[in-house]
Image (spheres, rainbow, N blue to C red):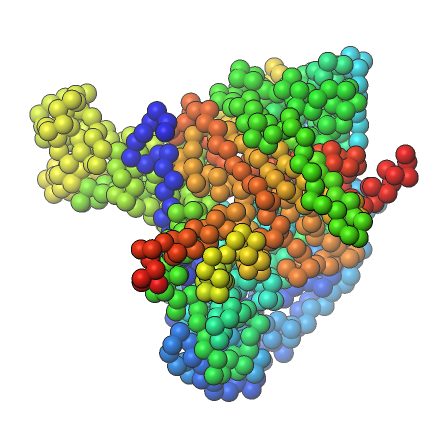
Amino acid sequence: MSALAGTAVGLSVPQLEGDDKLCGSAQYIADLHRPGMLHGAILQSPHAHARIRGYDLSAARALPGVRAIITGDDLDEQHRMGAFIKDEPAFAKGKVRYVGEIVAAVAAESEAIARAATQLIRVDYEELPAVVDPAAALAPDAPLVHEGSAQYIKVFDAGTDGNLCSRTEFTSGDVDAAWAGCDTVVEATYTTQAQAHVSLEPVGALAEIDAGGRITLWSANQSVFRVQASVCESLGLPMTKLRCLTPRVGAGFGNKMEAHVQPAVVLLAMKARRTVRMILSREEDFETVRARHPFSIRIKTGARRDGTLVAREIEVLLDGGAYGDDSPGVLGYALLMQCGPYRIPHVRARGRVAYTNKLRFGAFRGFGVPQVTFAAESQLDELAEQIGIDRIALRRRNMLVPGDPWFGGQAIRSNGLAECLDIVERESRWREPVAAPTPDAPSGQRLRRGRGIALSAHISGLLASGAIVRLLEDGSVLLNTGAVDIGQGSNTVLTQICAEALQLPVDRVAIASPDTDGSPYNWGTTASRVTYVTGRSVVGAAAEIEKKLKAHAGEMLECGVDDLELLPGGKVAVKGVAQKSVSFADISGRAHWAAGGPLIGTHSWVFDQKTFDPKRAVALGLPFAQIGIFSFNALVVEVELDEATGQVRVVGAWSACDIGRAINPMLASGQIEGAFVQGMGYALVEEMVWDGARLANPSLMDYKIPTMGELPETLRAYLIESDEPSGPFGAKSVGELGINGVAAAIANAIADAAGVRLRQLPMTGERVLRGLLESAAAS
Amino acid sequence: MSPASAATTGAARVELDVNGSVADVRAGLSTTLLTVLRDDLHLTAAKRGCNQGVCGACTVEIDGVPMRACLSLAHGCVDRPVRTLEGMLETPRMQALQRAFAVSGAFQCGFCTPGVLVAAHALLASDPDPDEAAIRRALSGNLCRCTGYARIVAAVRSAASSLAAPANQASA
């Protein structure tokens, strides 16, 4: 047990929503039902790129039960949404930009009627040449996905021009001169695929309009405030006209942070003047929402013969798809994180995002870091091999130690990386030979085992949060933050933080459901930010309540506030005199009925530590000037590779995360384990495949994610507590960190097992086998 | 009356035994059990994750066997008792599973959880002491994108041992 053995922090409290989820009574968007509710359905574009000349809605309108139809004609030209570049209408207007894009939507008395009606809509398309490859999109004569993209409103210096969606460049030191000082230089190109989020819950929304035209919108989302902003921007609504709420969310992983069907559902409700619910099918969700960016990465790293890293040059090209969405952020963040947790004095990192005629790519757990870590950590193994130095020794020599800043100059105040590395090296028995593979099968197949390692980091941070803590009449507490729990357990963690701050048991604190009418602003459940950023607001708001409690108690006990302290269980007492105390209930009663009024504590802040120190690095096109604090991960995996088929199986994984302090160790470990298995799917099997411009595998039948059958025999999460001075009770966040190094560690384990270096994800049996055959032919 | 399923052509009356009660609904010949459960009977524990029989989030018991409600036609369930998670909440087996899932952290978003619980409930009925391999086999048709599965395996094992403990044997 840690030094801070309080009422709540550090305890593995089961999720507060557990009873509801385990009884099947938790309500997700598709479980909500309102009186008189209509059902919505979408019509998707069959073309990758086409001008819309007009619509014929007569047959669809004539279908009995149809109540409203919306098309691009219901949208106006100037209202567009986008987190970084305002380039996206509520749905297709004027032209379609990818196969599967929403072209029109219908609200009807049943889902079947709505779906039937969408098929009766006739759209007059003029097909345009499409571009699906990002490099081809940036060629001078490529068809333009957006005409006039340079004129879109942007929130930073994106450099948008033609099909160039954004560009970013960071430099530190003098990389061109530095190569001369390197004894070994390794250069290679890595490519990564599109990964689908596959939250088990497909997206959906339910909009209800009142007689005065005010709309209430429930949806599967990661931020009620981003939903409100996106819908209002794309439809030109004042924010006062739209209230956004959230039911339980069937996971997000980034997919539900920005808008999906919410603008279309709100517009349907406005047009029908009726309540409308729309739930996408799994196929529609695959085709229309968003996915992880495919990266092409050229990376070059130089070191001295003792293994000291000297220089890094990296150039990345991202397929952004048809709309900007979070792409500029993913690019900028990937370039900030590509050095990994290492000191590299001379760095040039450049990248571009290209618009293409594919669905938009956006936020997905890791936010660009799994891609660059796959390249960078693979390259460190190649460098170690060429120099002839141990893989872990190379990493230890260069890794950031307490006192080192991050690339770009931001100070790091807690760094438990060394401990993470020590523990996974020890627990995986890295120094012992790998266990003998399971015996060869009679077919003569050969099994080989190997181990791989990767170090990585992630931020906890970004943007604004607030908290309101209210003392209820009976002395219990209601916490309201506006942060959406997408299933990871943030409601539980924030409640624990609040309970700890006020020395209450967890069951004396309730947490309000996010509501744009009643909650303080919260940017969202994204960027691994809720525990750290929102947690700080909870601590701040609780401190204000504590101050007010003491002011009352001072008057009630006739003493100075400095002589008072909180006692566990909801009491304020004279320091050292426990029997001279008043309860929270007594104080709240007094406040409500006699003196001062109800006790409310509030706090709000925005993360404001600068990412770049201009004396250390130069940034062009920086999407986040203030990004977050750093958490660290060390990961070892052991794989078994079948030489006959190329199939790779992960046998064991040991993942240690420095998360500052574990507010809830069970939930924190759950994040690390879940991230590992999701990363394992990314590394080995998952890939969205396009046949021309059409997604060829938009179903769970054709797009495979790991099942329980692929669960490694050993999967261990270790929590390292480095005590972040700025964090709530020392905590940093953990949501994304665990996925960043997975593909790299598996690639390094495959190389260790069979001497094959794979530079393309996913590392399918076919690719591994091809690699084995090529290396056999070469030797 | 039953807007979702009745809209389908050829809707006809069908009488189902769901969680021990008679459910009298109108359903088209191609209407699935999942649609009837969710939209007509408002039994929403079973989830529609893929509607294609892959994800397992709609798992229910038909004739005592865990099945995909999204692949089962409503008219095919006549005279075959249907039991959803809502109908299993009182069994000692389900309660042991729920306790184990809560304290093991064997769920996160909870969307796949009802299907996982129904499948695990059936497993423990046929094999009260399943080893890890048996659990993996029985639950490999239930996708979970959050937990990474290890805690689900541990929770099922822990529920099995708590049911085997002497204190529980009398009541189970």
Left or right, A534 with respect to A53, comes to left
Residue ID at (12%, 24%) = A577
Of A336 and A41, nearer the camera is: A336
Of A435 and A390, nearer the camera is: A435
Left or right, B35 with respect to A24, comes to right
Question: On the image, which quarter does residue A328 sit in?
Answer: top right
Q: Is residue A98 visible?
A: yes
Question: On the image, which quarter does residue A453 sit in?
Answer: top right
Of A261 and A10, nearer the camera is: A10
Residue A524 against residue A262 in the figure, above or below: above
Residue B151 against residue A7 in the figure, above or below: below
Q: Is residue A370 visible?
A: no
Residue A491 position in % (x across, y down): 39, 44
Residue A485 against residue A118 in the figure, above or below: above
Residue A61 position in % (x across, y down): 58, 76
Residue ID at (79%, 25%) = A186
Residue ID at (80%, 49%) = A444
Q: Quadrant of the C terminus of chain A?
A: top right
Residue A654 position in % (x across, y down): 57, 35
Residue A15 position in % (x across, y down): 39, 47
Question: On the image, which quarter does residue B72 sit in?
Answer: bottom right
Left or right, A636 with respect to A145, comes to left
Q: Quadrant of the N terminus of chain A?
A: top left
